[in-house]
Amino acid sequence: MDGDKVADNLIAAYEDLAPDFTRYLIEFAFGEIYARDGDLKHRELIAIASLATMGGCDAQLQTHVHGAFNVGLSQGQIVEAVMTLIPYIGFPKALNAMAVVKRVVDKRAGHVSTTGGG
């Protein structure tokens, strides 16, 4: 979904402190769960909705928004997923999630986004 970049970044960040932590995370989340039969587009939409609902997971949400684009979801589909969350998670969390989506869109387009959550 996001190539080796996510795994490489996790390994680099924690290899000295907790190498087993990243190994478990990568092997379980990506090696077991994401490798199961099913549609990666649906998995990414579920991840986006879950992370937006939890709040405070901007780095992980950003990774999964990138992943959603990488598996073929459109900007409109990702935006609509976040819009659908508004009545369930409220405007503050939806606004924060949309700010992450905007940062990813801007980054992929080569722009710098200064949009915060609010």
Image (tube, rainbow, N blue to C red):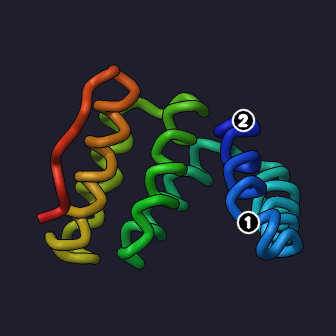
Q: Amino acid at mark 1?
A: Tyr
Q: Amino acid at mark 2?
A: Gly
Left or right relative to 7: residue 83 = left
Residue closest to the far top: 110
Q: Nearer the viewer, mark 2 or mark 1?
A: 1
Left or right relative to 101: residue 60 = right
Vertically, is 110 above or below 24?
above
Q: Residues within 10 Å of mark 1 (few under 14, many from 20)?
A: some
Residue drawn at (16%, 48%) of the image: 115
- Residue 54's disc is none
Residue drawn at (32%, 46%) of the image: 101
Vertically, is 112 above or below 12?
above
Badge 1 is on which residue? Answer: 14
Residue closest to the far left: 118
Badge 2 is on which residue? Answer: 3
Q: Please state the horizontal and vertical placement of residue 93, each as a whole percent of the image.
A: 25, 71
